[in-house]
Image (tube, rainbow, N blue to C red):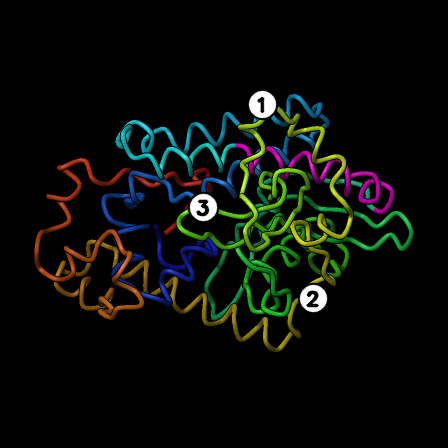
Amino acid sequence: MAVGTVTVFSRSGHESFLTCRRKFYYNYLYGGAGWTKKQTPMELAIGLAVHAGMEALFRGKSSDEALEETEKTWASYTKEAREANPNNTLLMSQLEEGSYLSQAFILAWLNFRAEEFHNTYEILQVEEELRVPLDICSATVTLAARCDAILRDRSTKDLWVLNHKTCKDWDSSTWKYDIQMWMEPLAAEHHFGEPCRGTIINAFRKGRPYQGLLNNPLIYGYTNGSDWSYTSKPGWKKIFIPQTSIDWQDRIRKIPEAVIDTVLPRSLPVYPPTQPILTEWLTSITRWQLEIAYYNSDDVSQEERLNYFEARRCKFTCASCEFSNVCFGQTDIDTVINDGLLQKRIDHHATAESS
């Protein structure tokens, strides 16, 4: 990549760089596109499956087609875990749970949110790559963003970005700090040539696991033998609805609105920061990208490169990192790759020049 022409890396790449530069280097640069865990984390697989189902709906596909796309995506991202651990009973239960929950989210949205959504917004774009050329610090920066959807309010005619978010817990006050809520409205604004108000969050709350499994009311219920509840009660038995004779899809349509609001939480729009904050942030991004391009070039030695992409060794970053054994000298990155423990990272902006 030529210095002076840089592409702003992804939100996950940006956060990885700020958290631990060495992890960023191995994840996004080493060997060309970088390397990632071979097995997709379960929570990420659910998010990818829900995104696939929502994209199918937004592109005009039927509910059955959307559910099929959701399940197909879930299966593709969990195939490695399933084949590697066939005798792990808890994992098999988690995989079954994730499959049904991903589809349940799509069904719940269709039954409780779709009509209101389509009455309020017109869908202008779905999952399209947007490029924003910026001119900062005498360097040409191309900001690449892929919005889940871009919307127009049918009443006010305002432009909005839509972002699907799957999460364990829901705290809408934190989204204003997420740079995705800064990048995507900026990209939409440039593409359409008009102001973009901000981001609408389409939330899917999974909940937190207990003893390895969730308690989400879309797929779980509780019974004392005669009565049913959507929440746990002392002495009541927890039931995984898809394993019963109950039509789990029909049950979702009958869930009370108050319960649905706990799994599809509503929130106020997220507005981007003020222009001075955006300018300061973009200036920092440009500086980092120029540094990254230089230290990843043939002009520096590997020792200099690793000194720049320093490892942040602490329990908060290393405990779950796939490169921790490398950073603590127990092995080296090429051995980990050759042993088949990692896979090439898929570059979703592959058509762009990227770091």
Taking the spot 28% from the left edge, 61% from the top edge, the residue there is 294
Q: Is residue 118 magenta?
A: yes
Mark 2: amino acid: Tyr
- Front residue of 24 and 296: 24
Taking the spot 40% from the left edge, 51% from the top edge, the residue there is 211
Label 2 or label 3, whichever comes before in sequence order? 3
Q: Residues within 10 Å of mark 2 (few under 14, many from 20)?
A: some
Give the percent coordinates (x, y) of residue 334. 13, 44
Q: Residues within 10 Å of mark 3 (few under 14, many from 20)?
A: some
Q: Is residue 38 left or right of residue 163?
A: left
User: Secondary structure under badge 1?
Assistant: helix
Mark 3: amino acid: Leu
The number of callouts visible is 3
Label 1 or label 2, whichever comes before in sequence order? 1
Distance Cα–Cα, label 1 vs label 3: 24 Å
Name the disc covering residue 213, or none: 3
Say above or below: 301 vs 86: below
Q: Are marks 1 and 3 in contact (CB under 8 Å)?
A: no
Q: Nearer the viewer, mark 2 or mark 3?
A: 3
Q: Residues within 10 Å of mark 1 (few under 14, many from 20)?
A: some
Taking the spot 62% from the left edge, 36% from the top edge, the residue there is 104
Give the percent coordinates (x, y) of residue 28. 32, 50
Please give the residue where the numbered disc 1 appears in the rendered image: 68
Name the disc covering residue 271, or none: 2
Q: Is residue 210 magenta?
A: no
Give the percent coordinates (x, y) of residue 110. 74, 35
Q: Is residue 178 left or right of residue 163?
A: left
Say above or below: 353 vs 249: below
Which segment did they paint magenta?
100-120
Taking the spot 50% from the left edge, 41% from the top edge, the residue there is 46
Distance Cα–Cα, label 2 vs label 3: 35 Å
Mark 1: amino acid: Glu
